[in-house]
Amino acid sequence: MRNKFLITVLAFSCIATAYSQDNPRLVVGIVVDQMRQEYLYRFQNKFGEGGFKRLMGEGFMLTNAHYNYVPTYTGPGHASVYTGTTPAYHGIIANDWWDKTLKKKVNCVGDENQKPVGSTDGHGAVSPWRLLSTTVTDELKLFSQKKSKVIGISIKDRGAVLPSGHLANAAYWFDSKSGKFISSTYYLSALPSWVDSFNDKKMSDALLNQEWKTLLPIEQYTESSPDDSPYETVMKGKDKPVFPYDLKKLRQQRSNYDLLPSTPMGNDFLEAFAEATIAGESMGKSGYTDFLTISFSSTDLVGHAMGPNAVEVEDTYLRLDRSIASLLKKLDEEVGKGNYTLFLTADHAAAEVPQSLKDNHMPAGYFTDDNSLKTELNNFLATYFPGKTLVESVSNSQVFFNTSLFSGDLKSSGIDYMLATELVSNYLLGKEGVAQVFPKSLIRQGSYTEGGMKGFVVRGYNFKRSGDLTFELEPGWYSSAHLQGTTHGSSYSYDTHVPVLFFGKGIRHGSSKQYHPIIDIAPTISVLLRIKFPSACTGQPIAEAMEEK
Ligand SMILES: [Zn+2]
């Protein structure tokens, strides 16, 4: 008995020296997909005590944190939070983009060399191989000789894969075919038994076999516009965009489990999986600092469909607030209060519904969609380059030329290229809704720290991957023919201004109105953990958020 006790003490002291006692046992990074900073205030009176309010009250809040590049999309957002740099360096220039070499559209986490794990025909040809720099999660792995556990989870594959980096033990995302959490062969050859047990509970069915009613009586949602609004998308199977949503009935209109992510129940499902991950992997108990990344995607899907003033969006945030409270409670129980550090941010914010701005005499508009613009530009260029289809893609506000079509001698001199660039620039500038056009040559002359819209373009532009020209629209404008719902992607503050909250071990109580770009989050965590910064980090640690050690 006595010997056993001694061995336990010795074993424990060995583990205890594996990392500094000042370091948190676990870091939890939360990204809320499509969250405006203002939601923290607009919905504050309806939040409970244990969720957002607890983070705001006990943690450190930045009230003036922004994305500092375009496009403000999900893939680039997640990559930038965890690499501490922007698409110019980390290479995730959009969610999907035109690959100039492969001559086809590629996805930011698509990887044809991988297969799904956990669902044979599921969506699992996925890995972080297109991410060109290390993440703070990678650096933690390098520091601990891979002994730290790093796991990424999300409804969207990119929300799980990019944050957890190249060295993650695993990333898990939702497979809408099977209703399960799955992974890819990049990480594992089979799902761990705790993931199988979670999937076996068929919680996605239980969540879809109910009605989505408002959490509070609907007349209390005074922070939002009336439920029946012309600016909201009507869900397939409904005739009005109003509560209640009979999910059991509505799911018949979709294939498989497709409906779940478009409801706040997608976030409930992820939160339950987060708790299962913490228990199943004994996160925070390895003796090394572990890292769990969580990305809540349903806020984005509901936000896109309904716009920022919908009761559906408010209800989704009130439910997320409850989910965050449950998660914090679980962390307190499993890892212990004061033993973990957590941050919460968003991958982008969201614009008003343009039509609602127009109807209220505010500047906004709908710009030509990508395919129509491509046709339009090719027709225009055909006058100068007869018989050639020069534009091979318009995507993410970028124009890609098929440069192999420029003629022989002129091609080597670059004169054709210059001519086409100038023609398209002037053509685009003549179109209503276009604010500025930036040809590649102009971007090359730009500086990374430059101000104004050009700086946003320079930091978002990767020379190997981005297009020949990029254009930015006027405030309130976006490319779409749909008059319902909204999007994001611009350099304007309605898309860039997001919450940043730090909480727990090593974090001061308070808030700051200082400007911080979102790329400051990763080096802050690096300093806190006393590890190397991510390999292409261009952010700076947020000193005011950290306790003096
Ligand atoms: Zn997003």
Image (spheres, grey):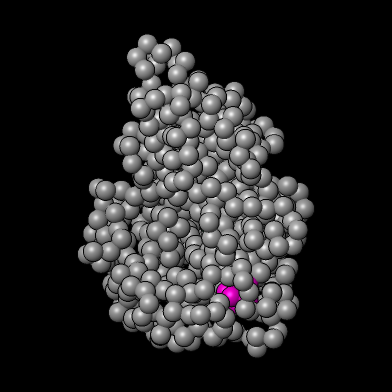
Image quadrant in which you'd find residue 316: bottom right
Asked if residue 279 can be seen in this view, the reply is no
In magenta, the rendered stretch is 310-317
Dominant SS type (magenta): helix
Nearer to the camera, 305 or 41: 305
Locate residue 346 relative to residue 266 in the image: left or right: right
Magenta span has 367?
A: no
- Residue 444 lies, with reference to residue 361, above or below; the image says above
Q: If the image is split into quadrants, where does the N terminus sit? A: bottom left
Q: Point out residue 27 in the picture as x, y percentages from the top left corner.
A: 53, 59
Locate residue 459 relative to residue 220 in the image: left or right: left
Nearer to the camera, 222 or 522: 222
The residue drawn where x is 48% and y is 25% is: 420
Asked if residue 487 can be seen in this view, the reply is yes
Locate residue 393 relative to residue 490 in the image: left or right: left
Q: Point out residue 50 in the picture as x, y percentages from the top left corner.
A: 64, 77
Magenta span has 312?
A: yes
The residue drawn where x is 36% and y is 80% is: 252
Q: Point out residue 414 in the picture as x, y percentages from the top left corner.
A: 45, 16
- Residue 430 lies, with reference to residue 518, above or below; the image says above
What is the count of numbered marks?
Answer: 0
Q: Point out residue 280 in the picture as x, y percentages from the top left corner.
A: 38, 71
Nearer to the camera, 92 or 313: 313
Nearer to the camera, 243 or 329: 243
